[in-house]
Amino acid sequence: MRLVWLALGFVSLALAAAGAVLPLLPTVPFVLLAAYCFGRGHPPFEARLLRHPRFGPHIRAWRERGAISRRGKKAALAAFAVSAALGLAFAPWPWMLTPVAAALIGGSWVWTRPEA
């Protein structure tokens, strides 16, 4: 089972790396997932993520308080808004409402998280 957690951790890190360059793919949630997976499959990798200067504070804030930084909230809400706008612009009725609903639900959840 440790190998499965380890593999999931690396897949999550790969998705996080892709999210760093692709505009609508998130980075930090995949890093959080990678830390979770490494915590179960290979604790030294988890410790390395926790020490990382960019991602470590986000992981600790999320684990301790369920907190998201103000910058992270703004980025997430902007991505939700862009996704909703693209859905409205290019999807046919009634499918155009799906990204709008997802943006409203996801954005509301992000908005209500404490700030780090």
Image (spheres, grey):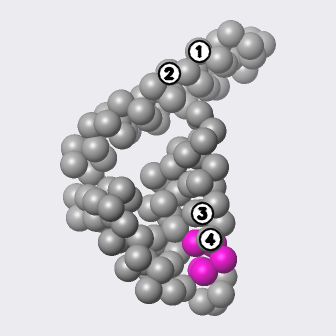
Viewer-nearest of labels 3 and 1? 3
**What crowding class fits label 1: few (fewer than 14 Cα within 10 Å), some (14-19), or many (20 or more)?**
some
**What crowding class fits label 3: few (fewer than 14 Cα within 10 Å), some (14-19), or many (20 or more)?**
many
In the image, taking residue 86 as reference, residue 39 lies left or right, namely left
What's the CA distance linking mark 3 and mark 1? 27 Å
What residue lies at 55% left-to-right and 31% top-to-bottom? 102
In the image, taking residue 63 as reference, residue 106 lies left or right, namely right
Instruction: Say which mark, if any, is on residue 12.
Output: 3
The residue under label 1 is 85
Whether residue 62 is visible to the viewer of this picture, yes or no, is no
What residue lies at 55% left-to-right and 46% top-to-bottom? 20
What's the CA distance linking mark 4 and mark 1? 32 Å
What residue lies at 66% left-to-right and 19% top-to-bottom? 87
Instruction: Specify start and end residues of the magenta stretch as a single range.
Output: 5-9
Vertical placement of 28 versus 33: above or below? Answer: above
The residue under label 4 is 10
What amino acid does circle 1 point to?
Answer: Ala
What's the CA distance linking mark 1 and mark 2? 6 Å
In the rendering, at what x and y percent does residue 112 appear?
A: 28, 38
What's the CA distance linking mark 3 and mark 4? 5 Å
What amino acid does circle 2 point to?
Answer: Ala
Q: Do the residues labelled 3 and 4 touch (CB within 8 Å)?
A: yes
Viewer-nearest of labels 3 and 2? 3
What amino acid does circle 4 point to?
Answer: Phe
In the rendering, at what x and y percent does residue 11 appear?
A: 65, 66
The residue under label 2 is 81
Viewer-nearest of labels 4 and 2? 4
Vertical placement of 53 versus 115: above or below? Answer: below
Disc with the residue nearer the chain's start (3 vs 1): 3
For label 2, the SS is helix
